[in-house]
Image (cartoon, rainbow, N blue to C red):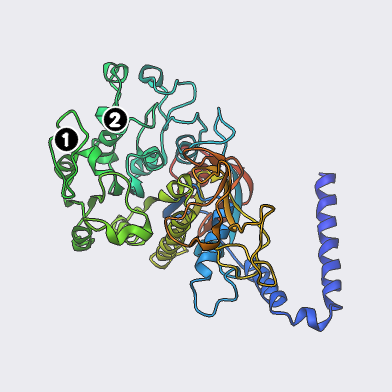
Amino acid sequence: MIKLRTIAAALSCSMVTLTVYASVLPANQTNSQWFKDGAANVVNKSQLTTGEHAKNVILFVGDGMGISTLTAARILQGQQHAGHQGGEENVLSFEHFPYTALVKTYTTNQQTPDSAGTMTAMATGVKTKAGIIAIADTSLRGNCLSSQGNELISLVDLANAKGLATGVVSTARLTHTTPAAAYAKSPERNWEADSNLPAEAIANGCKDIASQLVERSSDNGLSVALGGGRSYFLPKEVIDGEGKAGKRNDGKDLTQTWLNSYTNAAYVWDKSGFDAIDSSTTDHLLGLFNPSHMQYEIDRANDRGGEPSLTEMTTKAIEILKKNPNGYLLIVESGRIDHGHHAGNAHRALTDTVELSSAVQAAVAGTRSEDTLIMVTADHSHVFTIAGYPQRGNPMLGLVHSIGGELALASDGKPYTTLAYSNGPGAVVGVRDDLSSVDTTDKDFMQQALIPMSSETHAGEDISLHALGPGAHLAQGVIEQNVIFHIINQVQQLGGTKY
């Protein structure tokens, strides 16, 4: 108690000192727009109030969206605005949120995690091994028998049990790791279709992830599921609208199963079908817009069947879910940020991050902060760096130019980019390429890397959590990743535990 009082007294004295000091600051300091903006930011936050409970919760997950990705995407977006001051002053939509925390991402067996362990932590409140989806870490990865009895209850399970509407949206395959952790339980992240199941899993009754999405009991079913991965829901004998065969051995057409399972249900696979959906009369919507992952945002216009954007899918999901008078839980993943980084391709990763920002803005516009908690986070980071002392306003995807405007050169006499990776497919073995005549802003340009690897890796540092709405004040400090589950559970009163 004495220690707490001492700290409080010290803080009180510090505030007095700051107030006195501010009264003698020179006018050229207090008249600075930087000074005014900073003061206004603190005043605005000091006046914020937040409720304790939320009717609705939307959790956005930028897969692989580490702090350096946020910074680079923020600047890239800013440089696309007319009259920008360099781009650095820009703010992504969710960076306006009043509460922020840092989140530790390790899994129980890895310092640097994968998406299975990290999303399981967020979805169930329990950390587990890499590669395992909503299964306790006492199980063996890839072993069906060891997983039985170790299944974990997810936020979606709890929300459905309370009578809420639930939805999952992703630009990756819906059966891929991050969206799958919201609704499925599997000791192996790669068991996306029944054709992926090994003999041991089949013998012991484990179900593939696509089946688990569609064949949930009607009172525990998703109201909305939008993303990629169509092939995993169709038999091998079926050719879809884009000329691709399904992957299922069991002959099941799970899209038809979806339609048969619910009233006022719809299934769409292309942009025109999506646009035609009437949210007021559709209560259960399954959209599978690509045989595998959906297109990157920058490539979306070239898709054969056409695809809705992440913003459009988020908006449609909210329109359907909000009809439930009890409220809803929506999980939205921008899955291809991660894939762009793995490919050593910053342009696609950052463009998808900017699109996530747009989707969050649409969610804010389509909800009320009085009854809806919106949180934005990542599952893990990437070995992605911003370096080289470029001048203010240097093109985010360009070569480094120093403050005087001259092209910066490395010790080998060649220019280099602001963005790079510590490992990945862009690594140079031998003599480094001269980038003087290369368009580094091209969407296919692969940033250089230090260590040669076929796929760039995740990183292990903390990621961020941004929160707005009832209960947002719980997103503060440095937290374990599984705390995100507990924030949602408490704020939405899902009944997973008592606080």
Q: In the rendered image of this protein, does residue 381 appear above or below residue 10? A: above
Residue with the mark numbered 1: 235
Q: In the rendered image of this protein, does residue 437 appear above or below residue 455? A: below
* Depth order, front residue of 458/251: 458
Residue at image coords 44%, 30%: 131
**Relative side of 255 to 101, left or right:** left
* Depth order, front residue of 396/321: 396
Report the amino acid beneath label 1.
Pro
Residue at image coords 81%, 44%: 1
Q: In the rendered image of this protein, does residue 326 appear above or below residue 212? A: below
**Relative side of 75 to 277, left or right:** right
- CB under 8 Å between discs 2 and 1: no
| The label number, if any, that marks residue 117 in the structure image | none
Q: Dot 1: within a 10 Å radius of its alpha carbon, few (fewer than 14), some, or many (20 or more) residues? A: many
Report the amino acid beneath label 2.
Asp
Q: CA distance from mark 2 to mark 1?
A: 14 Å
Residue at image coords 23%, 40%: 231
Q: Position of residue 447 (x, y in %)?
A: 52, 52
Residue with the mark numbered 2: 208
